DNA sequence: CTGCACGCCGATCTTGACCTCCACGATGTT
DNA sequence: AACATCGTGGAGGTCAAGATCGGCGTGCAG
């Protein structure tokens, strides 16, 4: 009655039933799914290749028959996660020409990303492998790419300098990113849409007046 | 001429000259300084206890005579780094009663923190040990504590609900945190004070109008 | 029925990092 | 000036985790 409902061995991640064989392509995507779950739940360092193999219901050698090593596996998942948020951000910015709606749509993208079932955002926003340059480059690229797209809008619509536009855009991305993460951790006191709308309002009030820099 | 100017053994971090003995208290702070340098430069996992000992110019056993283990050493440094930013944030908020100045002062705190020589902010904002609950708790506490103090001001001055105030405050902290980090990574195209003032302006424009929620 | 190919598994190797044991030299005392 | 004491140093143990090798079962062509 204390913990471990029925048969969990480690911490809530029970392996698949060790089913029979499977075609290569299918096995590969299943391995990717299992690896994502384990990396999301435990982080890179705490996740052992044994855990991933057990989670997939296979043995460790098959994992190495599909991926050269742990880092490659992680980078594959990280790449798809990074591309997802960047593409969604691009689509949100292109979905309208009204900047107020742009802000709202982009904020919704971040909140949806964080709220998605798989939790892939943890690879991007809470990675524990930033010492690896390949990982660092991809993680930073999410912020810089999203910010760059936003900065284009800011620059063209306000005439601010490049560096100022970039910094403002990075601020907005940071606001979206960490507020969404802590909204999720907060446990849903506020609806996802309400939270996104609240922070979108904050962001819009912040940038809507530029480039006039002075008022009190 | 390629690399390793004169005598560096690993990667640009040359050890101290293996000087003689030292009183315990002094040795301890020297070990903490050396450990901070190594952890900041390489992250937790990539940093070996040998590296820290070499950096301090002592042998490994003396390290274990001062700290029970690697994690304890890291947590000691992390605690001081977390307390530093939290205390500075508190002081900035208490330094004035004008909310516009409060925002500017708090923003300056984050930029100064990130720009400080030792780079201790990397332990807080870029830790690679978030899988450890002790570390995760401390890292998250920085954001939640700072946000909580800001949320108090927002709540009392606007009458917004608790959850909304907290979320807005977290957004401001996130904005400060990631914009400061990327400003530093950007290489100083903008002055520290200019950057802080720019983002403070963005933040102030965002929150100054609450709680009236509707305008276009 | 028999040989072959394919995918899979148990058991093992190796590396690397955290963490301690025996010798040495400096310091304070008589 | 000689000796006891204590801190220091190099070398080694342990263990976890990434990466790998021979054997097994299944399905199919001949």
Image (cartoon, coloured by chain):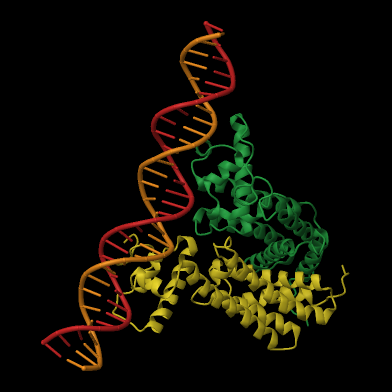
Chain colours: A yellow, B green, C red, D orange
Q: Nearer the viewer, residue A86 or D12?
A: D12
Looking at the image, how many numbered discs can be counted on the residues?
Answer: 0
The answer to whether one can see residue B3 in this image is: yes
User: Eyeballing the image, is A22 above or below B19?
Assistant: below
Q: Name the quadrant of the N terminus of chain B.
A: bottom right
Q: Residue at x 79, y 78 (%)?
A: A154
Q: Position of residue B121 (x, y in %)?
A: 66, 54
Left or right of A21 on screen, residue A210: right
The reply, left or right, for residue D10 in relation to residue A59 is: right
The x and y percentages for residue A136 are 61, 66
* Position in image of residue B130 (x %, y %): 53, 59
Vertical comparison of B150 with A89: above or below: above
Q: Quadrant of residue A169?
A: bottom right
Residue B155 visible to the viewer = no
Q: State which quadrant residue A80 falls in.
A: bottom right
Relative to C7, B151 lies left or right: right
Q: Quadrant of the C terminus of chain B?
A: bottom right
Q: In the figure, A146 relative to B112: above or below?
A: below
Q: Nearer the viewer, residue A114 or A196?
A: A114
């Amino acid at each position: 009655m204390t913990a471990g409902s029925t048969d969990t061995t480690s911490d809530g991640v029970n392996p698949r039933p060790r089913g029979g064989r499977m075609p290569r392509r299918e096995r590969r995507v299943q391995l990717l799914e299992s690896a994502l779950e384990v990396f999301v739940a435990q982080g890179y360092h705490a996740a052992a290749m044994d855990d991933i193999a057990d989670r997939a219901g296979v043995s460790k050698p098959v994992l190495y028959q599909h991926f050269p090593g742990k880092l490659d596996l992680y980078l594959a998942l990280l790449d798809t996660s990074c591309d997802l948020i960047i593409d969604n951000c691009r689509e949100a910015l292109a979905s309208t020409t009204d900047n107020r709606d742009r802000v709202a749509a982009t904020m919704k993208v971040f909140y949806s990303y964080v709220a998605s079932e798989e939790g892939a955002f943890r690879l991007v926003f809470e990675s524990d492998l930033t010492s690896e340059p390949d990982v660092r480059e991809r993680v930073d690229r999410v912020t810089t790419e999203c910010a760059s797209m936003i900065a284009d809008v800011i620059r063209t619509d306000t005439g601010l300098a490049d560096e100022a536009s970039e910094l403002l855009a990075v601020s907005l991305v940071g606001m979206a990113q960490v507020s969404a993460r802590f909204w999720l951790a907060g446990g849903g006191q506020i609806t996802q849409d309400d939270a996104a709308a609240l922070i979108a309002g904050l962001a819009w009030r912040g940038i809507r007046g530029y480039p006039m820099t002075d008022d009190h």
